[in-house]
Image (tube, rainbow, N blue to C red):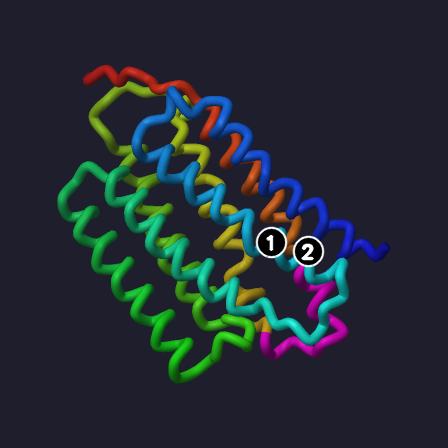
Amino acid sequence: MSTAELLSNITVASDFLPVAAALYNYRRLDPILRLMAVFCMLSVIPDVMGLVISYLQLRHYNNLFLIHLFDMMAAIFFTLIYYRAFYKPLFKKITLIFGIVSLAAMIFNVIFIESMSTYPSVSNTVLCIFLITLSLVYFYQLLTRQEFTYIEKQGMFWINSGVLFYFAINIFLFMLFNKISLPDKFNYYMMQSVTNIIANLLYSVGLLCKPQDNKTI
């Protein structure tokens, strides 16, 4: 088994960490983290199906449509998550506008640029730009709020850290993936596997956090 295949197996296994954390701590999750929990549960499906297809060696079966659907699902879920996480009306409006534009761009991409049977480089890039922007805005809100809070005990802090870490590192990989020669694709994609494992660990920490009371200062 190659290093790329090993990492691919580990990253699929790591998808179950935030799911387990969410199920363990579900009763104490706030509405925002419950949305994240549902997203993590649904995110397992495309990775597991891809791994099964790989093991069964069903090379004639194209599962790239799952990545297209995942991108659209991620755009919808993170729009809802960040809309609830932001408390300023301006940030909420920006989230809705960016979310609608991103989803529309992905649908346009499927219809006119990259079909469901093609790796969604454009959609992945759009999703990266969308979520990097929202995660940076959320950190700005977190660091400028007029309340005393231990940010390391806030579940959304860890979720947001995972989002920024994963999408900021992988944006150029996703952007250029279709231009990389076939023999090198799997080697470059190891970066995605490693960052996905770390992001899942951060999501797990966030989903294990207990609700915190904030004190205005």
Rendering quarter of residue 32 = top left
Rendering quarter of residue 110 = bottom left
Write down the region rendered in magenta.
178-189
Q: Identify the image quadrant of the N terminus.
A: bottom right
Q: Identify the image quadrant of the C terminus.
A: top left
Horizontal side, residue 33 vs residue 216: left or right: right
> How many numbered discs, if any?
2
- Residue 146 screen position, x and y as percent: 20, 26
Q: Which mark is residue 51?
A: 2
Horizontal side, residue 22 vs residue 181: left or right: left
Residue visible at 49% across and 54% down? 168
Tag 2 near tag 1, CB within 8 Å? yes
**Helix, strand or loop for disc 1:** helix
Graded by Cα atoms within 10 Å as few (under 14), some (14 to 19) or many (20 or more), the crowding at tag 2 reads some
- Give the residue type at disc 2: Leu
For residue 179, above or below residue 50: below
Rendering quarter of residue 10 = top right
- Residue 15 screen position, x and y as percent: 59, 42
Q: Nearer the viewer, residue 63 or 212?
A: 63
Label 2 – label 1 distance at C-alpha: 6 Å
Residue visible at 40% across and 66% down? 126
Q: Which mark is residue 47?
A: 1
